[in-house]
Amino acid sequence: MALFRKGRARKRGCSMKQYSASEEEAYEEVRKQTVDAWKDITEDWLDEAKDVPRPLLMRVINLARSIDVIYKDGDNYSNSGGVMRSFIQSLLVDALQM
């Protein structure tokens, strides 16, 4: 993994500098922060006592889901020819008929 590639590598580089960590430790820290963020999102969704309207919260969650799909395994936004292409094709071209 190159340290200063686009995408998550920048976050790893910042984590490496901030915590004086190796690249593997920084990668694990970023992964842990991502898991914690998803836990927070899920907790907020399940907490019906919040004053945030559900339709607004749903839009935020859908944006977070989209970003997760696009950037989880690298920068699939800039390099959309591989996995992202198959996602788009299955969603828009080969969609299920209901």
Image: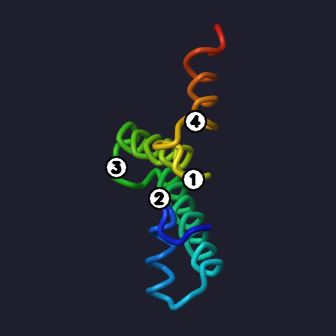
Q: Quadrant of residue 28?
A: bottom right
Residue type pointed to by label 1? Gly
Residue 21 rendering spot, x and y as whole percentages? 56, 87
Spatial separation of the CA atoms under disc 1 and disc 2: 7 Å
Using a 10 Å C-alpha cutoff, classify the residue at mark 2 as few (fewer than 14 neighbours), some (14 to 19) or many (20 or more).
some
Quarter-wise, where is residue 39 in the image?
Answer: bottom right
Judge from the rendering whether residue 48 lies leftward or rightward of residue 53; answer left or right.
right
Label placed on residue 84: 4
Could you say which is closer to the camera, residue 59 or residue 68?
68
- According to the image, label 1 marks what residue? 74
- Closer-to-camera residue (33/56): 33
| Disc 4/disc 3 C-alpha distance (Å) | 32 Å
Q: Which residue is mark 2?
A: 7
Q: Earlier in the sequence, mark 4 or mark 3?
A: 3
Left/right of residue 49 with respect to residue 36 in the rendered view: left
Do the residues under discs 2 and 4 have CB atoms within 8 angstroms? no
Crowding around mark 1 (Cα neighbors within 10 Å: few <14, some 14 to 19, many 20+) is some
Q: At which x and y percent is residue 72?
A: 58, 52
Mark 3 or 1, nearer chain start: 3
Q: Residues within 10 Å of mark 3 (few under 14, many from 20)?
A: few
Q: Earlier in the sequence, mark 1 or mark 4?
A: 1
Q: Residue at x 57, y 68 (%)?
A: 2
> Which residue lies at the image location 42% right of the left edge and 54% below the top edge?
49
Q: Which mark is residue 52?
A: 3
Calculate the distance from the C-alpha at mark 3 to the C-alpha at mark 1: 32 Å
Q: Earlier in the sequence, mark 2 or mark 4?
A: 2
